[in-house]
Amino acid sequence: MKDGKKRQAVGIDFGGTFIKMALVSDQGEIKARSKISTRDASGQQAWLEVVARGLENMGAKPKDLAGIGVGVPGFVDYEKGFIYDLTNVPGWTAVNLASLLEKRFDLPARVDNDVNVMALGECAFGVGRAYQHAVFVTLGTGVGGGLLIDGKLYRGAYSMAGEIGHISIKMDGIKSPQGRGGLEQYVGNRRIAERAVQAIQQGRKSLISDLVKGDLSAVTPETISQAAKQGDALAGEVFDFVADCIATAFASVTYVIQPQVFIVGGGVSQSGAVLFDPLRRHLTERLSPYFADRIEIKVAELGNDAGVIGAATLLFEGAGRVV
Amino acid sequence: MKDGKKRQAVGIDFGGTFIKMALVSDQGEIKARSKISTRDASGQQAWLEVVARGLENMGAKPKDLAGIGVGVPGFVDYEKGFIYDLTNVPGWTAVNLASLLEKRFDLPARVDNDVNVMALGECAFGVGRAYQHAVFVTLGTGVGGGLLIDGKLYRGAYSMAGEIGHISIKMDGIKSPQGRGGLEQYVGNRRIAERAVQAIQQGRKSLISDLVKGDLSAVTPETISQAAKQGDALAGEVFDFVADCIATAFASVTYVIQPQVFIVGGGVSQSGAVLFDPLRRHLTERLSPYFADRIEIKVAELGNDAGVIGAATLLFEGAGRVV
């Protein structure tokens, strides 16, 4: 082994629905996978047993491992490996998950926010590998983010930085527990669907109605993006608005930290040109040329694997440019 | 001399009105000063001569100096010491000021944006010296900013980060060459005055009118702050609005980079409680408790000296925590 370093780590993507695990090389390659429903691992002890079985299933031998990394959906103190609270997963308030893992497996363990971990995966082994200063954004039910600064994941003073979804784009806008006018309140999956549905209910004709066979409760951002690709006017307007909201937040981020690139992942990022063309145009309109000329927008590459790869990457300190 | 290091540097605050110079120790003490009107140093050669005379007047001996640092009002590439363009000072487009200074004085020279330099001064020797993660904001004609990350000034990927004044607080707000709804468009000195004046012109009674003896063109943020301190309702409303605009931008910055503290300088920061009480209140309203509980707001300490002290501090690499 090069430099005596352990060249594999286990990455765990601890989601509200699935716990996904992978054995990952320090080149970002997935060597084996394991997956279980989060409902089948209720409580901390059951969760640790799921990890134990996962390690066995994947043929991961502790002596070959640099350690175990976990991305969790909630607030974390990365330095301590401590979970303050998880969104949508009961039983995980004030838990030092890193020390539970270390005791159970006698291996180094690191715990970070799920979106930070995805950002790390994308920046180490995905489309971000060419950049030193990147902002990773995931568009889905909510909007999350992670920051790469000087080639390292930046977590802020208290481990919670990167909450791109809570940037206020309208000071008098929609209220939420996180403040007013947060980006997520306009471009979260449900908000996008609502916007199209409301227009249709108010009498706008749209291909969207046909695509869901009249069942407007079935409208998703994907339906709207399909309609937009076929030239539907309403769908195009909805994506133009979504793109402009995102551009407003991206412009603010660009003025504050001036990254090289925004890397956009999550379901909505699969919409292609119907999202990215107006996003680029609005972002350019919203920046002075000194900033507009220097900022790039890229689509994330690793998809659903960003979480497990990034979680494992937490252990590869010193392996290349990461952590 | 400790470690053979030069323990003094010359800091230059190159403003649109004055060129202020100071001989500064590596403890942030000002040992001597020199000041000249910017109009009397028109063009690069005249400017260099002004610096030469300033050095002489201050008794600064090149052999004792770590170098010369300059803060300039405009866009700069810090790595190269290169000025792209200065706002309000003609004749400084595409100038490598660091190399001009190095050739003329045979001393190391560094050039940075004026607000970055003030941020550095405040963070090294002012109210920011206790913090590793700080955002410095100056409220004046415009709104500028500088970022301290991990104890270092952070300039972004292309040396232009920290433009807090261009954060969009209203996506459909006031247009400017920097985009739409930028903070500066609502809380720049003139905008604050306009807001009060318009209300008075529309018939609102206010102590502000008395303070300027009816001459509404003489209204400044200072007048309004005086009136607010005496309990004037309109003045209080104007400051509440200004505070809420600033809080909106601060909330976004907090969600993105989660600093420990905002350090607020510039003329408007002298307003005291009429600004800072509503600012703190609105910021708390606009953040979830995880963020609100951890963020501080402080008033800058160094006042007009932040510029020269910070500019000199550019040269004290390795002296304590700075640069």
Image (cartoon, coloured by chain):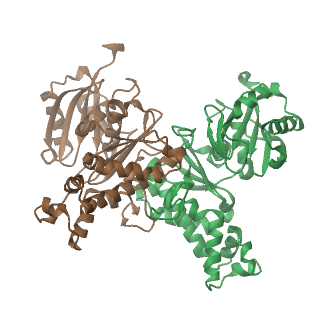
Chain colours: A green, B brown
Query: Which residue appears at 16% of the width and 47% of the height?
Result: B42
Q: Position of residue A259 (x, y in %)?
A: 50, 48
Question: Quarter holding the C terminus of chain A?
Answer: top right
Query: Which residue appears at 72% of the width and 53% of the height?
Result: A303
Residue B85 visible: no
Q: Is residue A216 above or below residue B86?
A: below
Horizontal side, residue B175 vs residue A137: left or right: left
Residue furthest out toward the front: B231
Q: Is residue B319 above or below residue A163?
A: above
Residue A82 visible: yes
Q: Quadrant of residue A60?
A: top right
Residue furthest out toward the left: B213
Query: Which residue appears at 56% of the width and 66% of the height?
Result: A243
Q: Quadrant of residue B306?
A: top left
Q: Position of residue A223 (x, y in %)?
A: 71, 72
Front residue of A12/B218: it is B218
Q: Position of residue B57 (x, y in %)?
A: 12, 29
Question: Quarter holding the N terminus of chain A?
Answer: top right
Q: Position of residue B268 (x, y in %)?
A: 27, 50
Horizontal side, residue A272 vs residue B50: left or right: right
Front residue of B253/B320: it is B253
Number of marks drawn: 0
Front residue of B268/B143: it is B268
